[in-house]
Every structure is written in structure tokens, then in C-alpha cells.
Image: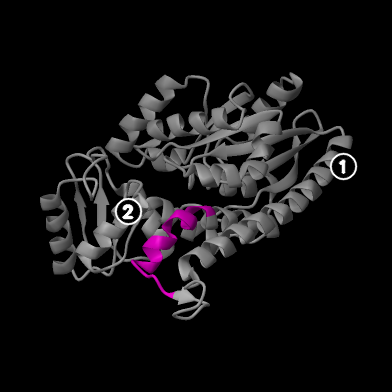
Amino acid sequence: MLVGGPADSLSELSGLCDTLGLEIAGKTTVSRIDVTPAFGTGSGKAKEICAHAKAESADCIIMDFELEPTKQRNWEKLAGIPVFDRQEVILRIFAARAKTKEAVLQVELARLNYSLPRLAHMYGDMARQRGGNYGSKGSGEKQLELDKRQVKERIRRLKTELEKVVSNRQTQRKRREKIPLASCALTGYTNAGKSSLMNALTASDALVENKLFATLDPLTRRLKIPGNQDILITDTVGFISNLPHSLIDAFKSTLEEAARADLLLIVIDASDTESEKHIETINTVLTEIGAEDKKKIIVLNKADKAESSMENSVHFSKLKSRFPDAIEISALTGKGLNELKELIAKSLYRITI
């Protein structure tokens, strides 16, 4: 059962749930989200949502907005089933898709930082004791306090281990930088077709799926462009609106590939009617990682699909009007790829074909 705020379409949360393989029993929205109430909304509305979830035989309730630990506990007491927010959904996707050692460490660190203030939620009102007996000097520490200590220690060890992995990455990057090759990074919203474009340009075998966050680990390949020049091109993790800051912090070393690149290809799914909002999210994340002033090329991908219906065609026309210098391509059909290479050459080396 999905619950959204006043302005939420729930389409993105639906996509996230689909990526996790969850079946959606129903959807509903709240008219407002307040800070003070026990549920973030009125108790009457909360009861109505829980009744709806029960009627649909939902196994859990997923909120499209952040749930504080206390509110999460209140919801679960009322609903009698697990309740979590979009941040936890994203964390679970990242945990399932992380492959390299660095990504695995980054995701685990983000999950532990997320779960630490929620340990009380996981235990409920548990007050089990460990150590000590009645009549002794003390009744021992609460299990909760012991587990908090263990989580904090694990976070410390993960940070130390991650520092070593990041150091190795920086060493590899310095070796690459000794080779006089310009670099280009594919950035953009998740599922915009960055990996498909990478494969089409370089004949590589990056994982391609019609799911959010198919790529977590950066992949770098050589690309020959007009003028008989070679460049390095990197496929990076996709962006998403309201990406948890814990994940932005955790993946900063990965996102540095975009911040260090000489040129950014901003890949936009031209067939997605929400793409203008996606562009705002992309600009926000690029600002957060210090890449807002980089050279950029706007790439309107899936141009073939963008003209497949009247609604998509109207949206596509608006995009082209907003970004007159953007290049239209299709990673699937190969449309515009040669023109894109020429534009890359012109941007990096001022080579005009």
C-alpha cells in the first residue's frame, strides 16, 4: 500500500517498488503533511489509510515522504503491519544491486546510519536486560544500548575500510590522469538510458534494465571521437528526487567521477513527461557535488519513443524549446550518435567536422 503527500503522483515510488519486486495493493494520498501530529497527518486520516490497507490485504505500508522513527512506530502500532518510507525502499534497492566492494561498503554504511535512530523502533518498548541479577550492583545494560554500541562500532570500522578503498580508487585515478586523455561522464536521472548510451557508444556490456538504479558502480571505457582522439567516458549512478543525504554522502567518492570530468553528458529521457522535474533534481545534485560549472551537453535520449504518442510529442517539443542546443538521440536505434560524438569533440577539443 503506497501513501503519498499532497503533490505526489506516486509514479516514482511505484517504480521503486517495482524494482524491488513488490506488488502494489493500492494507493492513496494525504491532503497535507504536518510536523506535529503523531502520524504526520490527522489521526482520522491515519485510521482511514490503515483500514484501506487492511481491506486490500496489504503486507506493508510505504510512505513517499520521510518518516521519523517515532511516527514510524506510531503508524505500525495503528496498522499492525510494517510501515516504512521511500528512503528505506531506496536503501534496499541499493543493497540488492551493489556489486563492487566500495558500493557494498557505502550501502551498508548508509543503512546503518539510517537504522541507528530506529533501533528503538525495531525493538518496540523492549527493556530486556543483559548481565547482572536481582540484588546485585546493577541490573545490567539494556539490550538496546548494547546494540547501539555495536552499530556505532560497525560504522567506525566501515568508515576506516571505506577510506582504504577510496584511497585505492584515487591511486587508480591518478594513474589514469597520467595518460593525457580528456574525460566525459554520463550523468542524469535514474533509468534515463545512460548505460544503453554507454553500450551504444563504446560497444561495452554495461547492465541495462528498465528499472530504477540498474547501475550503482561507475564503469569507465575508452571512446574514439572525430579527430582521431580517444577520451575516457564513465557511466555513473543515476539521480533521483529526494535522494537521502546519507546516500549522497556515501556515494560522494563515486559521484566524484562526474565532478572531476572535463565534460558532462546530461542524459534526459525525452519520453518521460516528468523529465523537466528530473532536470531540476539533476541540477540540485550537481550543485551538491560541486559540478554545476562543468561543461555540459544536454542529451535528449529515447527520441524515437518521445514521438510515439501525441502527449509525448507535445512534451518533447517543450523540451526542445527549453533546450535549443540539446542533441536528440536514440541509444536504441543509433539515431544522433555520430552527431553526439562530433559535439563531444567540438566541446573538448574545438574540433569541427
Residue 62 percent location from the top left of the image? 31, 57
Tell me the quadrant of the picture where the N terminus can be found: bottom left
Q: Is residue 293 visible in this depiction of the protein?
A: yes
Instruction: Quadrant for residue 60, please give it.
Output: bottom left
Instruction: Quadrant for residue 297, please give it.
Output: top right
Tell me the quadrant of the picture where the C terminus can be found: top right
Ranked by sequence position, the earlier of labels 1 and 2 is: 2
Q: Is the magenta stretch mostly helix, strand or loop?
A: helix
- At x 67%, y 38%, the residue is 256
Q: For the magenta stretch, what is the residue range?
A: 113-128
Badge number at residue 70:
2
321 or 119, nearer to the observer: 119
Look at the numbered disc 2 and give the secondary structure of its residue. Answer: helix
Residue 299 percent location from the top left of the image? 54, 32
- At x 82%, y 46%, the residue is 172
Q: Provide the residue designation for mark 1.
A: 175
